[in-house]
Every structure is written in structure tokens, then in C-alpha cells.
Amino acid sequence: MTALMQRKALYLNGEWVAAGDVEPVINPANEAVLGEAPLATRVHVEAALAAAREAFDRGPWPRMSQPQRQAQIARFLNAIERRAGDIIPLIIQESGSLQMLAHYMQFALPLQLARYLVEISARPSVTPLPVDVVPNALGTRTLAASVLSREPVGVVVAITPYNVPFLTNVCKSVAAMLVGCTVVLKPSPYTPFEALVLGEIADEVGLPKGVLNIVTGGAEVGAALTSDKRVDLVTFTGSDKVGAAIQAQAAPTLKRVVLELGGKSALIVRHDADIEKAASAGLGGITTHCGQGCVLLTRHIVHNAIRVQYVEALKNLIGGVKVGDPTDAAATMGPLIREAARTRTEQYVGIARAEGGRLIAGGKRPSYLKRGFYYEPTFFDGVSNNSRIAQEEVFGPVGVVIGFDTDEEAIAIANDTQYGLSGAVFSADVGSAYEMALQFRSGGVTVNTGFPQLTRNAPFGGIKRSGHGREYGEFGLNEFTYVKTIDFHAT
């Protein structure tokens, strides 16, 4: 990875283009500088868009047969897999991911999801509709037949986050490219190298020029991409505030937008739940990737008959969490991405205290870690669902416990949020848990398990301020296409 970090160039139209400006990229675990990343200018953005547009309008990629595209993307994924020894340590260093998460969720999982996309993209692009008989102006009837032609939407801008950068870089780009789109990928400024490495791999496997372009930079680069009329679709994963800004930037050109945004997901623990299993899921909602996950279960809605036991069980589990450097195999929670994220977490802990929440565990920086952006796993009991700590996304290792007495009350609390991404129900009565899951206003719900499994064919996404559109599987492929109807009439 040393060569990648020393290149200080952007991947545009199949070539590495030097950037005039650079900025340091920091390892959040120890605050050491990993390297200097290139910063795109409007000139680079223009070059990326022109390359993607040319490659789509006049290049070979959209005109290839589907087996040809599948073969190229399969080689692309095989080359990624061969680079595991380089990429996984980069994920750990750049995003602060624990070793287990880096190996499984950040690397193996996107390859599994992407390989399934390659497999199912073999579906027919043209499918017949049922034959119909319709009246005509001659007073007779016409035999009408139609086919649907599913076609690539065009130039796609993919903007990805810092929490699961490699997963989103790979899955967004592969889904778009498989159906014939061309891509401009813009990663988070915190995690640029996990995107730029895909440029090396595109070179290695010989992707046609302009099919994948990679630019780095901040909000001004993103705005230049999302507002440009040459872009047909923007896919973004990140906060709801940035998602709203992107939708506004895209509106004047009426381009399509797929948004996977934040969450404040509810874990409902019924009176008959296995408390230890539910508390373990609750722990994951607080500590997984230091709380930096949109799907994490941060509102624990617990039946008052078992609330004391649940709080005690969760407190005991948190006591066993080892906060530390992800390179330490014994660490079970790593750092936040930057000091700004830790400061934000501290501010919300202060807000929760001011609102009357009862601090049960955490609430401070670990004293034994002098470098890195660490914060103890933290949760509050006695929290009102109307409070800011229960309504606003912290994106740090903070959870809250809210009591309830009836299933109806639990569902009302769970749905009383501006978000709608995920949720969970724990109960010995699986039928009742399923019926409650149906009442969630969210894009996904799990029953008697905490973290949603990103299975190959299950669509993923949210409603309300958690976004719109779906990723992964056939639903994910469809987001990057449009449907054309071709009619055949016989009178």
C-alpha cells in the first residue's frame, strides 16, 4: 500500500492524474499519519464526469453482452480477493475497524454480496408481458403484446461513508457497472485509500477507460458531482443531513437519488425474552464499530417487568468490553473515526445527563489510552423517548433504555422517530414477535437476533429520514436501471 499512498493521484479515465493538493489521512487508533491523499479540484471533477459520460455514451461498456461484463467484473473481484493481505490491514488502519469486522464485514462480506450480483445479473434484459386484447378506433379489437427492456440508467456518482468504506465502495460500484453504467466514486475524506486501491485493481484487470473513476475531497467535490446535469443517478450512504443536501443539489437536474442514511433503531425486549441474549444484542448495538453504524440498535425498549434485570445484564456485559487498538486481537471495541466524532459523543452524553437520564455505564474517555479517539461504551436508563438522546443519531457508543408495559406501547415508541432503517424484537413467543415486526415502520426488522444479516438476496434500506431506495440483490441491481416498454400491435 506504500506505493498507493505515495502516488498522490486520482484515477480518471483509466489513468493516474496527479493532484496539486494533498491532505493527511490519520489512523484513528493512534493518530499517526498513514499517508497523504490527493485532493480533487473542479478540473479533476470535470475530467471524471467527462470520462464517465464518454464511456457510457460512446464506449464499449454498455454495449457489451452481459456475459462479457460479468467476466470482467468477476476478474475485478478475483483481483480484490488476491489483495486481501494488503487491503484488510488498510481497512483496520484507515477506518479503525476491529480485526474481526475488517476480515468479515468490511472485506469478505462485500465480496460475497458482489459475487452474487454477478451471478444474478445474467437475468434476461428483455422480458415479455402478458398478451392483451384492447379495443381500437376501427371498432374491432387489437392483439397487443409488449416487452420490458431493462437498461442502464447512465452515469452514476457513488458517494461512500467512513464507517464501512470498502463494503460500500465495492458494492455500489459493482452493482452499477454490472448493468452497464459508468461510475464516479467519491469516498469519505477520512478513508480515501480504500477507494483508490480499486483504481489499481481496475488497471490490473483492464476495465475500459472511464468505466470507473475515483475522485477524493470534501463537500465541495461532492456538490460539484451531485449537481452536474451529466450525472443520471447519485447513490449515497451517510447522514440524513448530508442526504437531504444531496437530494436538494440533485433536484434542479431531476436526477435519480438512492439514499441509505442514518438510524435510531429500536430493540424491543418483551417480558418473555431471553434476557441474556437480548442484552447481548443490546451490547452489539452500542459497541459494534464503536457505535458507528446506521443499523445499530441504540434504543432499547424493555418491558418494565424485566427492565431491572436487563439493565444489570447489559451493565455486566459492558464491563467485559476491552476498548483498545484494533491491531490488538484482544480488543473488542476500537476508536471513533476522529476527534470531532468523540467530541460529539461527549456532547450527547452531557445532553442525556441534563435531560435526566441515569448513567449506568461509561460516559468518559478511557484513561489508559493516551492516543486515539476512544470513548467508553455508554448507556442510560430512565430515558424518555421524547428526549434528544433518544431521538437524535449520536453515531458513537451510546445507547438508552426505555421502559414499556404493553406491546402496543412498545410499537408506538419504536415508531415514534424520524428514522426508519432497522429494528429488532426479542421474545419467546416467536409468533407475537413476528406480528410486532410487521408493525415496525422501518426497512428491516430482525426477530431474536440483533444485527441484521446482509444476505445476498435481501434488499437493504430505509424509510423516512433513513432514506429511500434499496441495495444488494436484485433490488439493488434494479436501482441502476430503468425500464423501457416496447409494444407490438396486430389488428
Image (cartoon, rainbow, N blue to C red):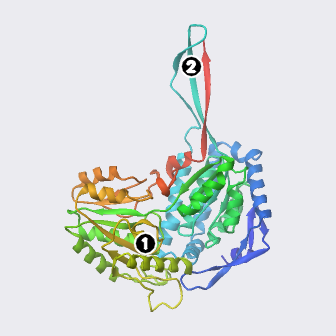
**What is the quadrant of the C terminus in the image?**
top right
Of residue 251 and residue 209, the one placed in the foreground of this image is 251
User: In this rendering, would 425 be left or right of 220?
Assistant: left
Q: Of helix, strand and loop, which one carries label 2?
A: strand
Q: CA distance from mark 2 to mark 1?
A: 55 Å
User: In this rendering, would 231 be left or right of 292?
Assistant: right
Specify the amino acid type for callout 2: Ala
Q: Which mark is residue 216?
A: none
Expressed as whole percent of the image width and height from the top left, the position of residue 428 reads 21, 59
Q: In this rendering, does residue 297 appear at all?
A: yes
User: In this rendering, would 160 be left or right of 62?
Assistant: left
Q: Looking at this view, name the residue that lies furthest to the top.
A: 139
**Crowdedness of circle 1 by 10 Å Cα count: few (<14), some, many (20+)?**
many
| Residue at (44% x, 51% y) in the render | 458
Label 2 sits on residue:
144
| Residue at (79% x, 67% y) in the render | 17
Q: Are marks 2 and 1 in contact (CB under 8 Å)?
A: no
In the displayed structure, 208 sits above or below 187; it is: above
In the displayed structure, 86 sits above or below 71; it is: below
Specify the amino acid type for callout 1: Thr
Expressed as whole percent of the image width and height from the top left, the position of residue 309 reads 22, 74
Q: Which mark is residue 288?
A: 1
User: In this rendering, would 292 be left or right of 445?
Assistant: right
Of residue 122 and residue 404, the one placed in the foreground of this image is 404
**What is the quadrant of the N terminus in the image?**
bottom right
Residue 27, picture quadrant: bottom right
In the displayed structure, 356 sits above or below 134; it is: below
